[in-house]
Image (cartoon, rainbow, N blue to C red):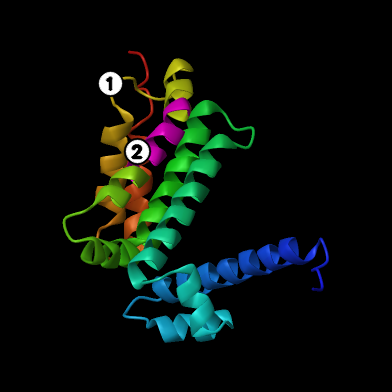
Amino acid sequence: MPTQPADAVPARRADARRNRDKILTAARQAFSEGGETSMAEISRRAGVGMATLYRNFPGRRELLEAVYADEVAALCSAAADPEGETPGAALRSWLLHFAAFITAKRDVATELLTQLGTDESVMHEGRAAGLAAGRPLLAAAQQSGEVRDDLTLEQIFDLVVAVATIPADAGYVDPILRAALDGLSTPPQA
């Protein structure tokens, strides 16, 4: 019986990883366009067969969860790399990234909530991960005196979510968000 070369299995794993990444990229793009996108359309955009799509994601819910989890991971990663800014500026930059995440994921989150029904654990896990990632940024900004210390990250998240979900275009929402974030600054001493 012929044996497979030692590198055959890792090559397949790398290929499977590439296929999964192509599917996630296609799904992220399709979902960001809004409206209902079929699994067949995602398969077509990714350039993979339906069997490959379903082998990676048995259903729409699993695909939505994976897209959401991938974006949460990117948000958390952004908190870990504040890019040499002051603590207050790093927090503000990250909160703007969070607002963009909320805006871009509105359709995904809405559809995911529909798929989940009463099981919102994925959403709660995503929020918990985001809060855990952002806590060091807020603590550093508050310790530096750049950000007021009477707000929790939960309150700030709720503020950003409230503004980011205003049903209007970015030209309308962005100035409101920036004004809200300006309100995080420690007031000058009298």
Left/right placement of residue 64 relative to residue 78 reads: left
Tell me what residue is drawn at x 38 percent, y 60 percent. Answer: 65
Number of the label disc, if any, that sits on residue 128: 2
Q: Earlier in the sequence, mark 2 or mark 1?
A: 2
Along the line of sight, which residue is nearer the eye, 98 or 8?
A: 8
Along the line of sight, which residue is nearer the eye, 181 or 73?
A: 73
Q: Is residue 75 above or below residue 23?
A: above
Q: Quadrant of residue 10?
A: bottom right
Tell me what residue is drawn at x 32 percent, y 13 percent. Answer: 190
The amino acid on which the numbered mark 2 sits, given as a three-letter code, is: Ala
Under tag 1, what secondary structure? loop
Under tag 2, what secondary structure? helix
The amino acid on which the numbered mark 1 sits, given as a three-letter code, is: Asp
Tell me what residue is drawn at x 43 percent, y 22 percent. Answer: 139
Number of the label disc, if any, that sits on residue 150: 1
Number of the label disc, if any, that sits on residue 35: none
What span is in magenta? 127-136
**Marks 2 and 1 in Cβ contact (< 8 Å):** no
Task: Say whether residue 167 is visible.
Answer: no
What is the residue that sits farthest to the left in this orientation?
Answer: 118
Task: Say whether residue 62 is visible.
Answer: yes
Left/right placement of residue 43 relative to residue 182 reads: right
Classed neighbour count for the residue bearing mark 2: other residues with Cα under 10 Å, few (<14), some (14–19), many (≥20)? few
Residue 36 covered by magenta stretch: no
Q: Is residue 189 above or below residue 31?
A: above
Q: Quadrant of residue 124?
A: top left
Along the line of sight, which residue is nearer the eye, 18 or 186?
A: 18
